[in-house]
């Protein structure tokens, strides 16, 4: 695995950050506004009080730690290209709209994207560098 100095990490990484070996992550992790949106929805997507509290803690940590990259005009243009590439690959881009917006934001900033779910980005090769990270408990 190639480790980059700076990269975007998607929601799958941020939501369970403690499960990843820091040595497999970029030195400087960036998130997108789309990830912040997904994390903001998380507490509302469960009726379990313990899960809700954990999701609120993740959201608050992300808000306090990161200044998210915006989903801007450049990202929107790349989103269209990425969706088209995903469609050509035989997949439905609408099912992965948030993931593909995150990928477009990374691509528009010329940054790789680290994810625990590389299959979510199948078809986007050539437009964004996707780096698979495998979760495992670390020794901390």
Image (spheres, rainbow, N blue to C red):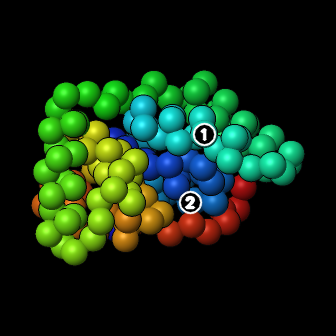
| Quarter of the rendering occupied by the C terminus | bottom right
- Kind of element beneath mark 2: loop
How many numbered discs sit on the rendered protein?
Answer: 2
Evaluate whether residue 106 shows in this view. no
- Image depth: mark 2 or mark 1 in front: 1
Residue 29's label in the rendered image is: none
The residue located at (13%, 51%) in the rendering is 81
Label located before the other in sequence (2 or 1): 2
Q: Residue 114: x percent and y percent?
A: 39, 55
The residue located at (62%, 54%) in the rendering is 16
Residue 41's label in the rendered image is: 1
Q: Which residue lies furthest to the bottom in this view?
A: 90
Q: How crowded is mark 2: few (under 14 residues within 10 Å), some or many (20 or more)?
A: some
Q: Residue 101: x percent and y percent?
A: 32, 44
Question: In which image quadrant can residue 74 be found?
Answer: top left
Side of 94 relative to 65 (left or right): left
| Quarter of the rendering occupied by the N terminus | bottom left
Side of 28 relative to 135 (left or right): left
Residue 21's label in the rendered image is: 2
- Kind of element beneath mark 1: helix
110 over 134 or under it: above or below? above
Q: Residues within 10 Å of mark 1 (few under 14, many from 20)?
A: some
Q: Residue 131: x percent and y percent?
A: 34, 62
Side of 78 relative to 33 (left or right): left
């Amino acid at each position: 695995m190639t480790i980059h100095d700076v990269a975007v990490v998607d929601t799958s990484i941020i939501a369970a950050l403690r499960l990843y070996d820091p040595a497999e992550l970029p030195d400087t992790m960036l998130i997108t506004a789309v990830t912040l949106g997904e994390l903001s929805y998380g507490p509302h997507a469960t009726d379990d009080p313990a899960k809700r509290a954990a999701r609120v803690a993740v959201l608050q940590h992300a808000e306090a730690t990161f200044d998210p990259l915006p989903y801007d005009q450049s990202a929107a243009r790349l989103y269209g290209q990425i969706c088209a590439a995903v469609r050509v690959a035989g997949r439905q881009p609408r099912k992965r709209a948030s993931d593909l917006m995150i990928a477009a934001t990374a691509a528009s900033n010329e940054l790789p994207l680290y994810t625990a779910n590389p299959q979510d980005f199948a078809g986007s090769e050539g437009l964004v560098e996707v780096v698979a990270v495998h979760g495992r408990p670390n020794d901390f």
